[in-house]
Structure formats: C-alpha cells, structure tokens
Amino acid sequence: MNRSVRFLQLAVFAVSFLMAGSAPGVEIPLRAWEVPSSAVVALGDLSYPAVFVPVTPCRLVDTRAGFGFSGAYGPPSIGAGTSRTFDIPASGCTGIPSAASAYSLNLTVTNTTGPGFVQAYPSGGSAGSVSSVNYTGVGQTVANAAITPGGRAGEVGRITITVGVSTTDLIIDINGYFTNIPNENNEFFISGNFNGSAAIGGTNYSSINGSHGVGGGAGGTGKIFGVRGEIGPLGAAGSSGVYGIGPNTGRLTYGVLGESATTANDAAGVLGRATGAAPSVFSNIAAVAGVRGEGASRGVLGIAGPSGTGVRGLSMNAAGNSLQSAGSLGVDTTYGVFASGNLGATGTKPFVDPHPYRAGTVIRYVALEGPEAGTYFRGRGVFVKGVAVIEVPESFRLVTDEEGLTVQVTPIGRAAAFGVTRIGLDSIEVESTRDGEFSYLVQGVRKTFKDWQVVVEGDEFRPESASSTIPGYLSERQKRSLIESGVYNEDGTVNLNTARRLGWDRVWAEQGTTSRSR
C-alpha cells in the first residue's frame, strides 16, 4: 500500500474483547483503545493523508432500552439484514467537526440473538465485503475498534451500520477523528517515522501551468513563511526540510518555488536553515545547505519583491557556504540571492537582458573572471596645460588595497605622449605633451581578499559517495579534467583508488553515504 495514504483508509485491528453471557441490564463501561497508525484493510474510502485529533472518549450510540439514549442514537435494537445511519457530529459528543475525514470508533455488539456480524462504512458508500465486528452465538458482548470514514456529498459526517444474520444491540464510542482541515490556529501537522519517504508528500500530475505538488501561502504581517522546513539535529545525511525536484520538461519548471511579494521584514517565500555542526573532517561543507536545488530546470527560484528576496537560507555550520536572501537588507537594496561568504559556481556567472527587438531572444554577458578579487573605476578627463588629476572615488578607496594599483590612460584625438606621475588612493596625477580629452581605467585588488589563492585543495568536486557518477551539469571540458585528474573513471564512475588515497572513503563512512548516489 502507498505509504502516503496508509493510515487514513478504513482499518480494523485485533483489540477485540469478549464478555459472554452479559445480561441486558449490565453496564458496559467506556473503554480506552489504541488508535491504529496504519491500515490493515484498505477499502479505498480515503485516498489522501490526514492527522489524528484526540477527543475525550465519549459514547455516541446505545440501542439498549433503559440506558439514557433515545431517538436516532438509541433503541430499538438493529434487526438482522437492516441498516441504520448515525450523524456523528450531531450526536451528544462535543468537539467533533462536520468536516472530519474519518472517526476512531469502538463498536460493541451486545444482547446478540445468534451468530452474525456488523459492518461500519461511510454513508452513501458501499458496505463492501469486510466486517467490523463478528459474533458467534446468543447473548454475547463483543467489541472491536475501527477507523471509519465519514460519508461524502450529502452524507458528510454520517456513518452507516449494517447488521447481518441476527439482531443485536449496538454501542458506539469515539476517542478522536482524522482531518486534513487546519486547527483553530490554521496549523496542520503530521508527525511520525516515515522511513525513506516524506512526512508530507505532494505529487501533482497535472500539465496545467501553475499547478503545485505542495503549495504554501503567507499573507499575514511580521515574520511569515510560505513554506518552512527544518531538519533536527539527528537528521540523516541526504535529508531535507523542504525537498523539491523540478523535472526538465520545459520552461518554468521548479523544484521549489517561493514568492515573497510583501515588503515586511523577515518575510520569505521559502525559508531553509541548516544549523547542524560541520563534521570535523571538513572546513567547508558544500552538501549541507539551507536551501538546495537540483535539476536541469530550476531547483530553487527566488523572486524578489521591491525590497526583499524570494529565497532565504542561513547555513550556520560552515563559513562561506551560506545562501541568504533577507526579507529586507536595506531600504534600497534588493537581491535575488545574497551570500554571506563566498558564492561558488562551476559554470559562468552571466547576466541576461531581453533582446530589444527580437522576441524569444536574450543577450547574455558573462562576468569578468580572473585570479584576483579585482576592483576598478573608469571615466574621462581633460589635460589642462599638460596636467590632469584623476580623483579616486571614496567607495573605491574604502575597498581597495593601496598596493598593486594600475592606471591605463588613452588620449582622445591626436596622438600624444603621456605618463602617470603619481598613483595613490586619494588621487592620481597624469601628464601629457598636449592638452585634450582622455579616458582612463584604474584597477586594484580588494583589500580584504588581496591574498586570494587561486590553486588550493578543495572538496567541491569530491564525489558524495562511492556509487556517485560524474555530475551531468558540468561542461564536457570539466568532465574531462575530472577524468584526467583521476577523480572519475572514463565510464563516469568514481575512481576508488583516488578515493582511498585521499581518504574520501573514510569521509563517506563517517557520513553514512558509502552507497548513496549523487
């Protein structure tokens, strides 16, 4: 049975008890019984998950004469081959909503007139071929617990009882209900041990644009989330607070889509935090992230509002591996993605503009790449009496190291000889053999990263497990480099000799990912 629906279909389980020979006047007390966590018998009445909400155990029905029940919930006994319908929310028991999906009931037959059985099922549906209680003789009292769905359409909240073979009295007790309706705080919770699966799974097979597997909307004020996922401190490797895979079926396919249209502080379309401590074998953990997206389309898409962002993730376990987009990082500041620390990428870092007159076409320029964290400013000046001064902007001066400055000067117009007579972070002086206009480019190195090392040891391309294969998102030249360096074999599998030599096998063993594939 599919685990996502396993505990909400009609279930009957063996917690029966037998009290033979009970007299009609003997009180049958309200008993405690265990609510089953999974279905033993699946009748297909429910095909969606819900949560159990307990209520104070309460007696719904007693058809025996003289025990205080009357009308639809009291006498007479139920005759052989006949049925009776009971409206559960309208009974004398309180706290049971009409929109409940199913009820946790204890069914007791007593004063039996011979062998027979009782079937409980949602009103308007079929009794099927499964009994809820069986009894074998005269004067017996037999009880059994059952999860019975409520009726549908015009029979919402109603269950039907059918008695077969012989007449009997019936007692029905309730200790809770199942629902997929949020509680009074508009909260919906599912908890349990879902080995190898998700606590909440949403699969949407629709091909209509805008359909969702799991959708979350946040419309209030203050600190609000559309979808929030947390992994506890005992979370296993490969586990996710929110996990989404976007199949590569075309444009606008997302694993997780979070939209934050509000300008309120700390508002996020999707919030993911990875707060666990980094294993000691790493200085940086690329596999642990607040928000992680994989796929040929878009694993994670963040759409920023006027002064916020679509995706916010704080990875506190390893400096430099944080993906962060705050709800408001400044009055005039808007980021699609903001990184606290270094932002790494195996591919290029392009910006994209729409083509101004060719529909369906874009213009992609790639960010300049080099072996240093370079800074620059440029502009135009004018030589007067052969001399010009280039004023250095304060912003450039604040972030640039005073050593390593370079200046390029280009005369505009006729050729001229010129030279740079002084370079400093306050100003730059240049001379020329003739007056006229010139352009300049001043370059430096960001002082907080002036010692940037280009070739270093790193685990960015270390396979996640011994059964990993060479990542498909890499370029062909990158794949070839990983094969030639011995990380992967020609067939794309992990080179285990390299793994043993560099100690990756020990890392996998500590992480429990020896056989987990990328």
Image: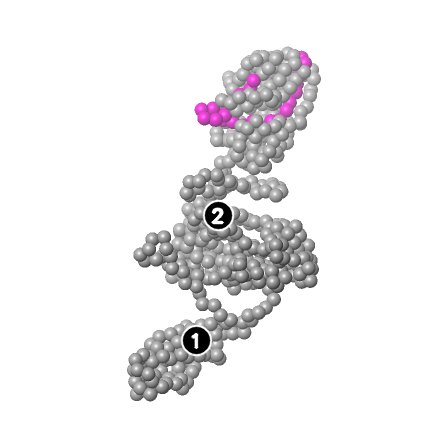
Q: Residues within 10 Å of mark 1 (few under 14, many from 20)?
A: some
Residue 5 placement: quadrant = top right
Q: How many tags in the picture?
A: 2
Secondary structure of residue under mark 1: strand
**Spot occupied by residue 478 in the image (x, y as percentages of width and height):** 55, 61
**Spot occupied by residue 181 in the image (x, y as percentages of width and height):** 49, 36
Residue 486 in the figure: left or right of residue 475: right
Given residues 97 and 69, the one toward you in this image is: 97
Q: Residue at x 53, y 61 (%)?
A: 477
Given residues 122 and 504, the one toward you in this image is: 504
Residue 310 in the figure: left or right of residue 111: left
371 up-or-down from 170: above or below: below
Observer able to see residue 103: no
- Of mark 2 and mark 1, the one earlier in the sequence is 2
Q: Which residue is mark 2?
A: 248
Q: Which residue is mark 1?
A: 443
Secondary structure of residue under mark 2: loop
Q: From this viewpoint, which residue is outermost toward the front?
A: 490
Q: Residue at x 63, y 21 (%)?
A: 133
Residue 438 forms part of the magenta stretch? no
**Spot occupied by residue 139 in the image (x, y as percentages of width and height):** 67, 14
Give the colour scheme of this rendering.
one colour
**Spot occupied by residue 485 in the image (x, y as percentages of width and height):** 61, 63
